[in-house]
Amino acid sequence: MPAKEMKTTCPYCGVGCGLKLSTDINEQGECLPVSGDETHPANFGSLCVKGSNLSQTLVPDGRLLTPYVDGKETDWHTAVDEAAERIKAIVAKHGPDTFAFYLSGQILTEDYYVANKLAKGFIGTANVDTNSRLCMASAVVGYKRAFGSDTVPCNYEDLETCDLLIMVGSNAAWTHPVLYQRIVAAKKLRPWMKVVVIDPRKTATCDIADLHLAITPGSDAAIFSYLLVASADTKHLDTAYIDQFTNGFEGCIANARKVTPDLKSTAEFCGIAADDLELLVQLWCSKEKTVSFYSQGVNQSATGVDKSNAIINCHLATGRLGKEGMGPFSITGQPNAMGGREVGGLANQLAAHMDFATPGAIDLVKDFWQAPNMAKENGLKAVDLFKQMEEGKVKVVWIMSTNPMVSLPDTAQVQSALEACDLVIVSDIQASTDTSKFADILLPATGWSEKDGTVTNSERCISRQRGILPAPGEARHDWQAICDLAKALGFASGFSYRAPHEIFAEHAALSCFKNNGKRDFDIGHFSQINQQEYDALLPVQWPVPKGRPEGTKRMLTDGRFYTPNKKANFISITPQKPVLKVTQDFPYLLNTGRIRDQWHTMTRTGKTDKLSRHIDQPYLAISPKDAQTLNLVEKQVVSVANELGRLFLRVKISEDQKQGQVFAPIHWTAAYASNAVVSRLVQPVVDPLSGQPESKIGRVNIESKTDLTYGFVILNQDLKSAVFDEKAMEYWCQIPLKQGIRYELAFSGQHNLAAMARELLTKTAIDAHQGQWLEYENPINQSKRYAYLIDDVVQAVFYFSPNCELVDTAWLVDLVESASKVTAQERSAILVGRLANIEDKGSLICSCFDVGEKQIRLAIKAGDTDLVSLGKRLKCGTNCGSCVPEINACLIADSLAVTSE
Ligand code: SF4
């Protein structure tokens, strides 16, 4: 068959980039190539390093291929029947609210739609929540309080055409890289455009900031409350807009004057210089075309909804929304968090942007679905859901495409909940995840490259995801699995879809059913869509009502909102500091977030060496002063603990951290590292309105461990089974290689290291008898090095030392991966720990062209003192651009070094 190219959508972040994928499959089973879709309005052909390395994540390793019931492999028919019988028995005895779905912003709109319909219309419970609760639930409630609807008014072009961009709680350079690069390019073209970053940390996003406000964590709302006051005081209010299109301004401004009366006290509350706040006020007042771009730093807070409304208040007061280059723009983290919102896939939504409290909505949906058991009120939001599960009130949970054992706060509580739950069903693409261990019924799901459906990105753009590869083994699409269960429960008539386009058409038909302009979400144009049209569907921004097939680029342009009197609401808010305070026992504030090259819990990105090279291990970023106080050195493994648990993380000393604050990334699970699940240390404190956890705030103590032995192991193949136990070893982390695997280790106690190396070898498929051991033990510095060769080909290398600064591993990895016979020089180099003439690249900065920090520093010294000449010499930063902020940091550090010389 000749190779064919298909257009689909990236499965990672909420930018929603269009991709082109070929049916050409190489020997490793990878589709080649993956490239950006030049015609997609989100990215116009660009991709970040995660998107461009997607083909490498399509390897079959670890895929779940058949259903399991109570740990025994079985067929789908048996698994579905078993699930249905158990659900029927539990629901009949204890009621429908003992059932729950826990879904994911990774699944497709069609999957979401049938799950929502089954639970809310047929089983009769609104317990349908999702990991999107952890991502953008506060933004949803903020919009609804202000606009009466969950309407994102802006589009990506607004980010390019504004004159002032305020980025609040967003490290878009790493989390939404293609969108960030669009902003970078726009700023270059329009040098008068100013960017302000509001973030406690100095992140890569600050690379383009004209002003960085490193606020006290959680104090964002005060900034916007004061901006409202300043807008009034400087006569920058749009009084015509306020009078004609809004409710509640007088009360709101009076409250803002009370809670943020002046610049000085506000600056103090936020922990910033008054001059910096003054500068922001000047920018705000002088540049009408303003977008406030906000993300998890705002949403993941006990007052996330108020923060959203503080931002929206400023835009309403100045009439800055619904126009080009203006508006409050919340960005979703996940690829289809927005699709879930459209469907109603949250426990406090009903369906199609209707709530249980919307007059007539329950009957409307009941009629449309012909539903026998309509839920009547809100269900349980994520944190409450798992609390009630622990208490035995929720007895069945179907977890789909997400890993709550890693992502929810207080994972020890989540474990207790899953253990207490009578029936845990898990649908996943991977056989072994931190959550799947608790499954009574485990269902193999299709993955991104195999699924057909739609997703909606942060700018309301609906795009097709197109399956290109066949489903492996017995894997099934999530919508099919849900419909199979629905039929087994006796609801065949409502779930007899033959293909995803039929679900999409029904979803569209519901969106326009008795709508008549009352609801913002209307994609009625697609209510009769057929297979051919669905296959050809081009990206389009909703609403797409009947008669408007081109969709809608910008919303709320006419000043009409979805409240009872069609006016937007000002919401009075009182800025609050985070609920959790540091104490003497836990004196450091822990911030959590993402890194550049990994996605969520690494079930996909963790499979490729390419994405592990930028940052390969879980870490704790700490300020130089705090590191000095605690006597910590770079790369040392430290204990990070609080009332909820203890982690062991590598130290990363960073000038970008403020004193008293530390940062740890969220990605590492028990499958990839020991004691590194950061959510374990996050208290389940939630926003009372949105139920979104305050995941950005934890409090911890940090202890230096001085008695550790450090080591690494490089194997030319993976271990047959996990041998590192987190109880036996404080720290291990596995890092994929092109060929084989590397383990980083740190452990206390006395061990026979030579015996340990030999024991480890027996856990692999390497022939442990035919080869030759090389051994070196240095009695002075206690370092020990072993290597195992068969026919002069290195199979495994083991290095141990009491010192955390081990040697550079890159050349050793190359040696093992080359699988060629070693020379005498290489043989001794393995034992010495250094190979002459091998360039140490330093930590990887440019993943696209494999360029390390040391190479960049050397090139700068050699005279390449700007981005362009570095790009010419090393190619770094010339592809996706994600590494440009880090290259710029090297340039700045070097120029500072020159200045101080
Ligand atoms: Fe995928 Fe987001 Fe990167 Fe685009 S920016 S390629 S959607 S991860």
Image (tube, grey):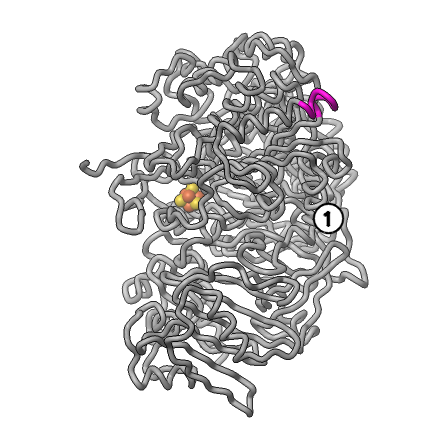
**What's the residue at 77%, 37% (across, down)?**
391
Q: Residue furthest left?
A: 2
Dot 1 amino acid type? Gln
Residue under the image location 40 percent in, 59 percent down: 609
Task: Tell me the quarter of the picture where residue 235 sits.
Answer: top right
The answer to which image quadrant residue 203 occupies is bottom right
Q: Is residue 149 magenta?
A: no
Residue 900 in the image, given as x and y percentages of width and height: 50, 78
Q: Is residue 94 in the magenta section? A: yes
Quadrant of the image for the N terminus?
Answer: top left
The residue tagged 1 is: 683
The residue lying toward the viewer, choosing from 166 and 123, is 123
Q: Is residue 323 visible?
A: no
Coordinates of residue 170 in the picture (x, y in percent): 55, 47
How many numbered marks have been drawn onto this rendered protein structure? 1
- Could you tell me if residue 133 is visible in this image? yes
Q: Could you classify mark 1 by the number of other residues whose Cα lies within 10 Å: few (under 14), some (14-19), or many (20 or more)? A: many
The residue nearer to you, when weighing 374 against 361, is: 374
Location of residue 77 in the rendering, given as x and y in whole percent from the top left corner? 49, 27
**Cβ of disc 1 within 8 Å of ligand 1?**
no
Q: Is residue 677 left or right of residue 540?
A: right
Ligand 1 quarter of the rendering: top left
In this picture, is 693 found above or below 452? Answer: below
Q: Is residue 95 above or below residue 860?
A: above
Which region is colored magenta?
Answer: 89-97
- Residue at 31% across / 65% down in the picture? 874
Q: Is residue 229 above or below residue 80?
A: below
> Overall secondary structure of the magenta stretch?
helix
Residue 567 percent location from the top left of the image: 63, 19
